[in-house]
Amino acid sequence: MDYRDRCYQSFVSKHWNYVHVLSREEFDFHAELYSKTYLAHLPRDKQALILDVACGAGHFLYFLKKQGYTKIAGIDISQEQLDIARKMGVDVVQKADMFKYLAKNKGKYELIIANDIIEHLTKNEVIQLLDAIYAALKPGGKVIINTENAASLFGASRVFIDFTHEQGFTPISLSQVLRVCDFEQVRIYPNSPVHSFSSWVRVQMWKVVERMLKMFLVIECGLGKGLKKRDILLEPRMFAVAEKVKA
């Protein structure tokens, strides 16, 4: 049996149960975070067709339902995670191979979500997935991709927190591969929402640390005298928003 198949069959019982609570409170907490981070990037039309690729236990779909989106769907290969999603009232999920599913639904979606999946793929599979997502989007449709930021201070520990992670991305490499797959208007954002007073304090402390880290990078790499374009993002997690502009 392939190591990924073996891990995914017991993803909850052998992994997630040790790092997640998987309760209603956790889902509500994530929904609050998502509303502060992603709301501005969602379609205005609540009837928009939205697909969550590798939806896991359905945290993002739970958030979309709370926001009033009605034409949403999620796919995943982990039956354990899909069972949790259904227990949380997220019944718009099904077990499916994402490559085969996307191939059957070309030009269909206004938005496709790909949270915490590209780091599980080989480089060839990343290209294959992004090409398939591009084909499944309508012209003007968007993709949102959330992943670990390998450029962060403890990037290696974030990237390899899961045995099934194959690789890591920096803001620059994530932008690169999206452009290679013909996406346009590629934007990378830090994933660091403020959701309470304590988190606001953490963000203020982070800003101090971030300035120190950026100073270190200037010392290490120099300023480039205007010859280099560098978009420095050092938060531990990041997400990309990109568009399919052409028909």
Image (cartoon, helix red, strand yellow):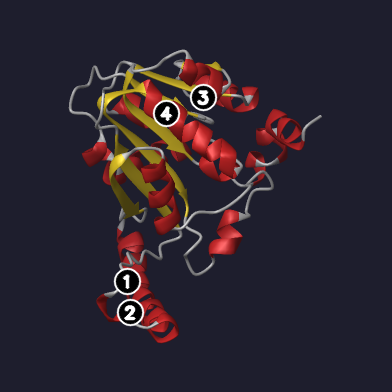
Amino acid carrying mark 3 in the image: Ala
Mark 2 vs 3: CB contact within 8 A: no
Task: Give the residue at x 63% y 22%.
Answer: 79
Q: Report the Cα–Cα distance between label 2 and label 1.
A: 6 Å
Please report whichever mark, 2 or 4, sits nearer to the chain's N-terminal start.
4
Mark 4 vs 1: CB contact within 8 A: no
Circle 4 residue: 133
Circle 1 residue: 228
In the orientation shown, which residue stands out farthest toward the top? 104
Task: Give the residue at x 59% y 28%.
Answer: 81
Q: State the image coordinates of residue 69 (x, y, percent, origin top left).
A: 28, 22
Q: Report the Cα–Cα distance between label 4 and label 3.
A: 23 Å
- Would you say residue 87 is visible in this rendering? no
Q: Is residue 45 above or below residue 114?
A: above
Task: Give the residue at x 46% y 58%.
Answer: 170
- Would you say residue 150 is visible in this rendering? yes
Mark 4 secondary-structure assignment: helix
Amino acid carrying mark 2 in the image: Gly
Q: State the image coordinates of residue 43 (x, y, percent, origin top left).
A: 22, 29
Q: Report the Cα–Cα distance between label 2 and label 4.
A: 36 Å
Q: Nearer the viewer, mark 4 or mark 3?
A: 4
For the C terminus, the quadrant is: top left
- Is 244 positioned to the left or the right of 51 in the image? left
Mark 3 secondary-structure assignment: helix
Amino acid carrying mark 1 in the image: Lys
Circle 2 residue: 224
Q: Nearer the viewer, mark 1 or mark 3?
A: 1
Please report whichever mark, 2 or 3, sits nearer to the chain's N-terminal start.
3
Q: Nearer the viewer, residue 189 or 139?
A: 139
Please report whichever mark, 1 or 3, sits nearer to the chain's N-terminal start.
3
Mark 4 residue crowding within 10 angstroms, few (<14) / some (14–19) / many (20+): many
